Amino acid sequence: NAFKGVFDGGEKTITGLAISDNALNTVGLFGVIDGGTVKNLNLTEVSINVTTKNAGAAVGIMVNNSTVDNIVVSGSLTAADGVGGVVGRMMIDGTISNCTNNATVTATSTSAGAGGIVGKAYYSALNKIMSITNCTNNGAVTCGYAAGGITALSAANVSNCSNTATITAGTEGGGIIGEQSMYGTVTGNTNSGLIKNNGTGGFGYGGIIGWVRYSGNVTDYPLNGIINVTNNTNTANI
Protein backbone atom coordinates (compact mmCIF):
# COMPACT_ATOMS: atom_id res chain seq x y z
CA ASN A 1 0.00 0.00 0.00
CA ALA A 2 2.49 2.59 -1.20
CA PHE A 3 1.80 6.31 -0.82
CA LYS A 4 1.46 7.91 -4.28
CA GLY A 5 0.27 11.41 -3.43
CA VAL A 6 1.86 14.64 -2.17
CA PHE A 7 2.42 15.14 1.54
CA ASP A 8 3.37 18.75 2.33
CA GLY A 9 4.19 19.15 6.01
CA GLY A 10 3.99 22.93 5.76
CA GLU A 11 7.18 23.28 7.88
CA LYS A 12 5.36 21.74 10.85
CA THR A 13 7.06 19.46 13.41
CA ILE A 14 6.27 15.90 14.45
CA THR A 15 7.92 15.03 17.77
CA GLY A 16 8.59 11.58 19.19
CA LEU A 17 8.08 9.30 16.18
CA ALA A 18 8.89 5.89 17.72
CA ILE A 19 8.98 2.56 15.86
CA SER A 20 10.15 -0.75 17.31
CA ASP A 21 7.98 -3.23 15.38
CA ASN A 22 10.30 -5.95 14.07
CA ALA A 23 7.57 -7.33 11.81
CA LEU A 24 7.95 -4.31 9.52
CA ASN A 25 10.34 -4.55 6.58
CA THR A 26 9.97 -0.91 5.54
CA VAL A 27 10.10 1.56 8.39
CA GLY A 28 9.38 5.29 8.52
CA LEU A 29 6.62 7.86 8.76
CA PHE A 30 5.84 6.55 5.25
CA GLY A 31 6.85 2.93 4.69
CA VAL A 32 6.91 3.13 0.87
CA ILE A 33 6.31 6.01 -1.53
CA ASP A 34 5.76 5.14 -5.21
CA GLY A 35 5.87 8.19 -7.46
CA GLY A 36 4.91 10.31 -4.46
CA THR A 37 6.31 13.36 -2.68
CA VAL A 38 7.08 13.99 0.99
CA LYS A 39 8.32 17.48 1.80
CA ASN A 40 8.60 20.40 4.23
CA LEU A 41 8.62 18.57 7.56
CA ASN A 42 10.63 18.47 10.80
CA LEU A 43 10.92 15.14 12.61
CA THR A 44 12.38 15.60 16.10
CA GLU A 45 13.20 13.10 18.86
CA VAL A 46 12.84 10.21 16.41
CA SER A 47 13.41 6.79 17.97
CA ILE A 48 13.54 3.94 15.43
CA ASN A 49 15.03 0.67 16.68
CA VAL A 50 14.27 -2.46 14.63
CA THR A 51 16.04 -5.65 13.63
CA THR A 52 14.67 -5.50 10.08
CA LYS A 53 15.77 -3.24 7.18
CA ASN A 54 14.86 -0.26 4.98
CA ALA A 55 14.44 2.30 7.75
CA GLY A 56 14.33 6.08 7.48
CA ALA A 57 12.64 8.70 9.62
CA ALA A 58 10.59 10.08 6.72
CA VAL A 59 10.46 7.16 4.24
CA GLY A 60 11.47 3.50 4.32
CA ILE A 61 11.67 2.98 0.52
CA MET A 62 11.15 5.44 -2.35
CA VAL A 63 10.67 4.23 -5.95
CA ASN A 64 9.45 5.37 -9.38
CA ASN A 65 10.59 8.98 -9.48
CA SER A 66 9.51 9.85 -5.95
CA THR A 67 10.68 13.06 -4.26
CA VAL A 68 11.76 13.78 -0.69
CA ASP A 69 12.53 17.45 -0.09
CA ASN A 70 13.25 19.75 2.86
CA ILE A 71 13.09 17.24 5.70
CA VAL A 72 14.96 17.81 8.98
CA VAL A 73 15.53 14.88 11.35
CA SER A 74 16.90 14.50 14.88
CA GLY A 75 17.02 11.55 17.27
CA SER A 76 18.34 8.04 16.56
CA LEU A 77 17.75 5.25 14.04
CA THR A 78 18.95 1.63 14.26
CA ALA A 79 18.12 -1.18 11.82
CA ALA A 80 19.81 -4.23 10.34
CA ASP A 81 20.40 -2.79 6.86
CA GLY A 82 19.44 0.05 4.52
CA VAL A 83 19.07 2.64 7.27
CA GLY A 84 19.27 6.39 6.66
CA GLY A 85 18.45 9.44 8.68
CA VAL A 86 15.81 10.61 6.20
CA VAL A 87 15.24 7.70 3.77
CA GLY A 88 16.09 4.02 4.12
CA ARG A 89 16.45 3.18 0.43
CA MET A 90 15.99 4.89 -2.96
CA MET A 91 15.81 2.72 -6.09
CA ILE A 92 15.78 3.24 -9.88
CA ASP A 93 15.02 6.98 -10.00
CA GLY A 94 14.01 9.83 -7.74
CA THR A 95 15.28 12.91 -5.93
CA ILE A 96 16.30 13.66 -2.36
CA SER A 97 17.04 17.34 -1.87
CA ASN A 98 17.52 20.04 0.79
CA CYS A 99 17.40 17.59 3.70
CA THR A 100 19.30 17.71 6.99
CA ASN A 101 19.96 14.83 9.35
CA ASN A 102 21.04 15.42 12.94
CA ALA A 103 20.19 11.89 14.16
CA THR A 104 22.60 9.06 14.89
CA VAL A 105 22.29 6.27 12.32
CA THR A 106 23.36 2.66 12.95
CA ALA A 107 23.16 -0.51 10.83
CA THR A 108 23.76 -3.68 12.82
CA SER A 109 24.37 -6.28 10.09
CA THR A 110 27.94 -6.98 8.97
CA SER A 111 26.78 -6.85 5.32
CA ALA A 112 24.71 -3.70 5.64
CA GLY A 113 24.66 -0.07 4.55
CA ALA A 114 24.01 3.07 6.60
CA GLY A 115 23.92 6.70 5.45
CA GLY A 116 23.25 10.02 7.08
CA ILE A 117 20.63 10.96 4.48
CA VAL A 118 19.75 7.68 2.69
CA GLY A 119 21.00 4.22 3.54
CA LYS A 120 21.25 2.97 -0.04
CA ALA A 121 20.63 4.60 -3.43
CA TYR A 122 21.17 1.86 -5.97
CA TYR A 123 19.66 -0.51 -8.52
CA SER A 124 19.25 1.36 -11.78
CA ALA A 125 17.35 1.34 -15.08
CA LEU A 126 18.11 2.78 -18.48
CA ASN A 127 17.18 6.47 -18.80
CA LYS A 128 16.38 6.66 -15.07
CA ILE A 129 18.44 8.83 -12.71
CA MET A 130 18.67 9.08 -8.93
CA SER A 131 19.77 12.44 -7.49
CA ILE A 132 20.82 13.52 -4.00
CA THR A 133 21.48 17.24 -3.77
CA ASN A 134 21.96 20.04 -1.23
CA CYS A 135 21.74 17.72 1.79
CA THR A 136 23.65 17.92 5.09
CA ASN A 137 24.46 15.25 7.64
CA ASN A 138 25.45 16.12 11.20
CA GLY A 139 24.70 12.74 12.79
CA ALA A 140 27.24 9.99 13.48
CA VAL A 141 26.87 7.01 11.12
CA THR A 142 28.01 3.51 12.12
CA CYS A 143 27.88 0.25 10.17
CA GLY A 144 29.61 -3.12 10.19
CA TYR A 145 29.97 -2.86 6.41
CA ALA A 146 29.50 0.29 4.28
CA ALA A 147 28.80 3.73 5.72
CA GLY A 148 28.63 7.22 4.23
CA GLY A 149 27.81 10.67 5.50
CA ILE A 150 25.21 11.01 2.75
CA THR A 151 24.71 7.42 1.53
CA ALA A 152 26.44 4.06 1.98
CA LEU A 153 25.95 2.49 -1.46
CA SER A 154 25.27 4.68 -4.48
CA ALA A 155 24.57 4.59 -8.20
CA ALA A 156 23.23 8.14 -7.99
CA ASN A 157 24.30 11.68 -8.83
CA VAL A 158 25.36 13.28 -5.54
CA SER A 159 26.02 17.02 -5.52
CA ASN A 160 26.53 19.96 -3.16
CA CYS A 161 26.13 17.86 -0.02
CA SER A 162 28.12 18.02 3.21
CA ASN A 163 28.98 15.85 6.19
CA THR A 164 30.33 17.03 9.55
CA ALA A 165 29.93 13.84 11.60
CA THR A 166 32.10 10.80 12.34
CA ILE A 167 31.62 7.90 9.91
CA THR A 168 32.54 4.43 11.21
CA ALA A 169 32.54 1.49 8.79
CA GLY A 170 33.69 -2.11 8.74
CA THR A 171 34.72 -1.53 5.13
CA GLU A 172 33.94 1.14 2.51
CA GLY A 173 33.62 4.27 4.63
CA GLY A 174 33.32 7.72 3.05
CA GLY A 175 32.54 11.21 4.22
CA ILE A 176 29.95 11.46 1.46
CA ILE A 177 29.58 7.94 -0.03
CA GLY A 178 30.75 4.54 1.16
CA GLU A 179 30.76 2.93 -2.30
CA GLN A 180 29.93 4.47 -5.67
CA SER A 181 29.13 1.69 -8.14
CA MET A 182 28.61 1.50 -11.90
CA TYR A 183 27.33 5.02 -12.59
CA GLY A 184 26.93 8.57 -11.32
CA THR A 185 28.57 11.92 -10.67
CA VAL A 186 29.92 13.10 -7.32
CA THR A 187 30.56 16.83 -7.38
CA GLY A 188 30.73 19.89 -5.16
CA ASN A 189 30.54 17.97 -1.88
CA THR A 190 32.44 18.67 1.37
CA ASN A 191 33.42 16.51 4.31
CA SER A 192 34.81 17.59 7.69
CA GLY A 193 33.87 14.46 9.66
CA LEU A 194 36.37 11.83 10.81
CA ILE A 195 36.36 8.61 8.74
CA LYS A 196 37.39 5.48 10.63
CA ASN A 197 37.41 1.70 10.65
CA ASN A 198 35.35 -0.10 13.27
CA GLY A 199 38.31 -2.20 14.35
CA THR A 200 37.71 -5.21 12.09
CA GLY A 201 40.49 -4.38 9.64
CA GLY A 202 38.36 -3.57 6.60
CA PHE A 203 39.38 -1.62 3.50
CA GLY A 204 38.22 1.25 1.32
CA TYR A 205 38.16 4.58 3.18
CA GLY A 206 38.09 8.09 1.78
CA GLY A 207 37.23 11.63 2.73
CA ILE A 208 34.66 11.77 -0.07
CA ILE A 209 34.20 8.16 -1.31
CA GLY A 210 35.47 4.95 0.24
CA TRP A 211 35.48 2.91 -2.95
CA VAL A 212 34.61 3.53 -6.60
CA ARG A 213 34.08 0.33 -8.55
CA TYR A 214 32.27 -1.39 -11.38
CA SER A 215 30.60 -4.46 -9.93
CA GLY A 216 27.11 -5.86 -10.45
CA ASN A 217 25.07 -7.70 -13.04
CA VAL A 218 23.42 -5.92 -15.96
CA THR A 219 19.97 -6.92 -14.72
CA ASP A 220 20.36 -4.88 -11.56
CA TYR A 221 22.63 -2.21 -13.08
CA PRO A 222 21.81 -1.69 -16.78
CA LEU A 223 22.81 1.97 -16.44
CA ASN A 224 26.59 2.23 -16.32
CA GLY A 225 29.28 4.60 -17.45
CA ILE A 226 32.27 6.65 -16.33
CA ILE A 227 31.88 7.80 -12.72
CA ASN A 228 32.91 11.45 -12.49
CA VAL A 229 34.26 12.72 -9.16
CA THR A 230 35.01 16.46 -9.32
CA ASN A 231 35.38 19.58 -7.18
CA ASN A 232 34.94 17.91 -3.79
CA THR A 233 36.73 18.92 -0.58
CA ASN A 234 37.79 16.87 2.43
CA THR A 235 39.34 18.46 5.53
CA ALA A 236 39.04 15.51 7.91
CA ASN A 237 41.36 12.75 9.06
CA ILE A 238 40.94 9.20 7.79
Image: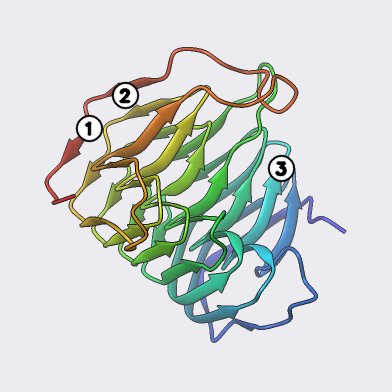
Residue type at numbered disc 2: Val
Mark 2, Cα crowd under 10 Å, few <14 / some 14-19 / many 20+, is some
Q: How is the image coloured?
A: rainbow
For the residues labelled 3 and 1, say whether their Cβ atoms are less than 8 Å apart.
no
Query: In the figure, 97 relative to 181: above or below?
Result: below
Question: Can you say which quadrant of the picture contains the N terminus?
Answer: bottom right
Mark 1, Cα crowd under 10 Å, few <14 / some 14-19 / many 20+, is some
Left or right relative to 211: residue 94: right
Query: Measuring 40% from the left and 72% from the top, which residue is drawn there?
Result: 104
Label 2 vs label 3, nearer the camera:
2
Callout 1: SS: loop
Query: Measuring 57% from the left and 16% from the top, which residue is drawn there?
Result: 224
For the residues labelled 2 and 1, say whether their Cβ atoms are less than 8 Å apart.
yes
Query: In the figure, 98 relative to 23: above or below?
Result: above
Examine the rendering and report whether any part of residue 39 can be seen: no
Residue type at numbered disc 1: Asn
Q: Earlier in the sequence, mark 3 or mark 1?
A: 3
Q: CA distance from mark 2 to mark 3?
A: 25 Å
Left or right relative to 44: residue 186: left
Left or right relative to 90: residue 42: left
Give the residue number, with chain letter if any, for mark 1. Answer: 232
Question: Residue 25, percent across and down?
Answer: 76, 65
Callout 3: SS: strand
Residue type at numbered disc 3: Val
Question: Residue 170, percent across and down?
Answer: 40, 56
Query: Measuring 31% from the left and 24% from the top, which residue is drawn there?
Result: 229
Give the residue number, with chain letter if any, for mark 3. Answer: 63
Give the residue number, with chain letter if any, for mark 2. Answer: 229
